[in-house]
Image (cartoon, helix red, strand yellow):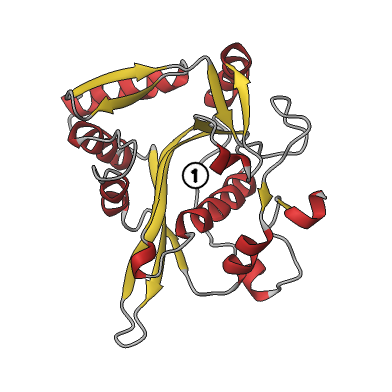
Amino acid sequence: MPPRHATIADSLVRQIVSAYRRGYFPMADIRAGELFWCSPERRGVIPLHADDPLAPNSTFTIPKTLRQKVRSGKFVVTADRAFTQTIVSCANPDRPGAWIDETIVGAYRLLHDAGFAHSIEVWRRNENTGELILVGGLYGLAIGAAFFGESMFSLPAIGGTDASKVALVHLVAHLRRRGYRLLDTQMWSPHLAQFGCVEVDRPDFLRALTPAVTDRSVSWGVFLPSDSDAITPRRALPGVEREDDAA
């Protein structure tokens, strides 16, 4: 069989992955119809390990009420089962601060097909039909031992209150289980701060980024929901700190 020739899609994937390796990510100005690259002076990071040099005094924390919701078993959590539906839900133009346009959706679908972009989906089961209904989730990019969180969404009107937070808990458990070293949230916010997110200067972020994105020993692998926490309520999710443990 003759070798496959590189396509425009292959070239686009390479360009985007290369930009992430150098600390850039794309955003869209939906009103102006423009796409631009960002590398903020201050970067949001959720520490995956207690000895993370970027945040030696912080680690991922699960608020008590959220831990109870994760344990409740009310949600079904999957990965990469509905990537397009997840990113389209994140791209809802009516959301405050919406920045995801059709170009970004198309690009990340290519990144998903190439094995770089992943989604965590949170579902509720219809009590009458048994059908699974997507009520929240998140998506991002995995390169080496770094995961770049892009966006998340919840649909409270159909039973998805805190569904995006539940997705984050399962994401962190998966990243730690697989050996990831960096979880980039791009921007710091009070919402993310409750989980231990810290803000770091760009030079410090880039110093941590380079070895993480060049680490070929880490891969996304098979996603396993953290069912141990739901089955045994007294146990914390593997590798994460509980809010009452941190007090």
Residue 123 position in % (x across, y down): 39, 67
* Residue 112 horizontal side relative to residue 67, left or right: left
Residue found farthest to the bottom: 128
* Residue 172 horizontal side relative to residue 51, left or right: left
Looking at the image, residue 168 lies above or below residue 162: above
Residue 98 position in % (x across, y down): 30, 37
Q: Is residue 13 visible?
A: no
The kind of residue on which mark 1 rests is Trp
Q: Which residue is mark 1?
A: 220
Q: Residues within 10 Å of mark 1 (few under 14, many from 20)?
A: many
Q: Which residue occupies 34% across, 36% down?
A: 97
Residue found farthest to the top: 203
Based on the displayed image, in which of its 4 quarters is residue 188 positioned? top right
Based on the displayed image, in which of its 4 quarters is residue 85 positioned? bottom left
Residue 2 position in % (x across, y down): 17, 30
Looking at the image, residue 51 lies above or below residue 195: above
| Dot 1: element | loop
Residue situated in front as seen by the camera: 60 or 110: 60
Looking at the image, residue 121 lies above or below residue 35: below
Q: Is residue 115 visible?
A: yes
Residue 135 position in % (x across, y down): 37, 63
